[in-house]
Amino acid sequence: MPNKSMTKLEPYFEKRDRLRHLLGVISFDVETTAPEKSIEKENDLLNFYSAELAEISQDKEFIRLVKAAKEEGGLNDAEALLIDDLLFDISYMEKLPIEKFMEWNLAMSKCTEVWKKAKNASDWSMVEPYFKKLVEIKREESELLRLPFHKTKYDAFLSQYEKGQTQEDVDRVFEPLKKFLIENLPEVLKRQSKLEMPPLLPHDKDSQAHLSIDLLKAIDYDLTRGVLRETEHPFSDSIARDDCRVTTHYYEDDWRSSMYSVIHEGGHAIQFQCWPDYQFENHVNGRASAALCETHSRFYENLLGRSKAFAPVLLDLCKKNLGGEFESMSVDGFYNLVNQVTRSLVRTEADEYTYCLHIILRYELERDLINGKLEVEDLPSAWNKKYKEYLGIDVPDDAHGILQDVHWYGGGFGYFPSYALGNLYGTQILAKMKKEIDVDSLLEKGDTKPIKEWLAKNDFAYDYLNPNDWIKKVVGQEMDPSYFIEYLREKFLK
Ligand SMILES: [Zn+2]
């Protein structure tokens, strides 16, 4: 017997899907091609249809049916997750008075607005009072988000992005990783200084744009169900079933930046393009957690895109599209150039080895801040101290330090760990994949289709599950940092 309330909910779900599709198309247009003078009206459309979307979840009949669906039972696994998500959101809104909701939203957008100015002026003191208010709000909000298995205030935010996970889970995997990364960084840098490193020469935007299309084809991104455009910050968007778009940004003085943005965003979009019917029919497409999405973008960017096996293929594409120094560049030289490790200040420019240190220190700071073990006024000095301790560098100013990322100033606590967890999951999945298919020889031939097909069948098909359940389904065991540590040891220390 099908669940009767689910049948009655179907038109609501379909309307949500249509509105999200529409909003996706309009926001992509605003970000990429809308004429300057049309943007105000397009933003007006976004507000109008976002409000319509929000109204569905406040609809009394909709809420009644969601509660009834849970009571009726007989849901399949995807429906059960969807209903639990909706019940969580409903209970949050029921606990939160509307005046408070408005006040909190206002405080968050004000803080983001002031952060932009503070970052431009490189002056933390400008945003400090607004941020202090925001942290107070978040500590209060954590009580509304609290679930029975949460032990700390921070757990409430973490499990918003990584459902079912706690700071205990994250500490368990970050601690050994951090120790390894800090201890071995000097040795990695010493080895790097002895490597053949070709010069990094400028290349114009047009040739890089042609290269981008070839890169997307090389990773088997379906260009009949997606497009590539240019934006200030690269992103990808699963707008609809057959419409998963990517963007990049070209820097003429560093072709590597766009090359790996294209492969990263392409990796995200490949995951979206491979979602099976089951997820769409049950409206759980897009339920994959932040870490599960980062797993696949990083899988393509680093595990495939920065591998020795794929380097000859990428070098050939550079020869074809960029010419110049690539004509005489060796495969080893190319490989070294795209795997350069440096002590850097800015997270988004960090290399594969040091990236997790940038994340771990942010995680430790936000965890302690939300849990009340660290106060806002001590945050900048704690930030600078950790950069010195973990990465061995002095932070010269706030713009390149505590003000560099928008996340905290928009209230996005609990998101940072997802970036690093993606690296951990990816190497675990690669190890499993290598037992079943010959990944390296496929990469050498430039044949990435079987890799995509393996991921679609064994991994993407289950990515609507909560992270702990998904990783067990894909690799048969829980999240284990030793795979990533071994991968880094093999790559940078041998
Ligand atoms: Zn990403």
Image: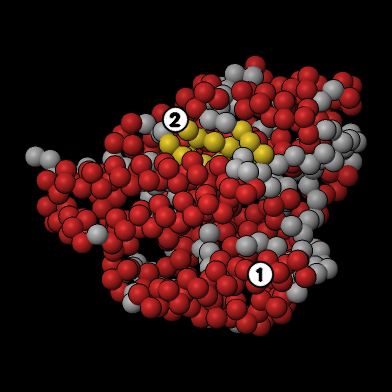
Circle 1 is placed at which residue position?
Answer: 115
Neighbor class of circle 2 (other Cα within 10 Å; few <14, some 14-19, many 20+) is some
Q: What's the amino acid at mark 2?
A: Asp
Q: Is residue 332 left or right of residue 215?
A: right
Work out which residue is located at the far top of the displayed protein and give it: 445
Above or below, 446 against 227 in this view is above
Q: Position of residue 229 (x, y in %)?
A: 63, 36
Q: Is residue 487 left or right of residue 476?
A: right
Q: Residue at x 20, y 62 (%)?
A: 60
Neighbor class of circle 1 (other Cα within 10 Å; few <14, some 14-19, many 20+) is many
Helix or strand or loop: what does disc 1 sit on? helix
Q: Residue at x 89, y 35 (%)?
A: 201
Q: Quarter holding the N terminus? A: top left
Above or below, 75 against 94 in this view is above
Q: What's the amino acid at mark 1?
A: Trp
Residue 242: give its label: 2
Nearest the eye: 396 or 384:
396
Q: Earlier in the sequence, mark 2 or mark 1?
A: 1
Cα distance between the residues tagged 2 and 1: 37 Å
Does label 2 point to a residue whose CB lies under 8 Å from ligand 1?
no
Q: Disc 2 vs disc 1: Cβ atoms closer than 8 Å?
A: no
Where on the picture, by quarter, is residue 259? top right
Can the viewer see residue 429 in this picture?
yes
Work out which residue is located at the far left of the displayed protein and give it: 1
Where on the picture, by quarter, is residue 21? top left
Q: Position of residue 7 (x, y in %)?
A: 16, 43
Does label 1 point to a residue whose CB lies under 8 Å from ligand 1?
no
Can the viewer see residue 428 in this picture?
no
Q: Position of residue 425 (x, y in %)?
A: 52, 45
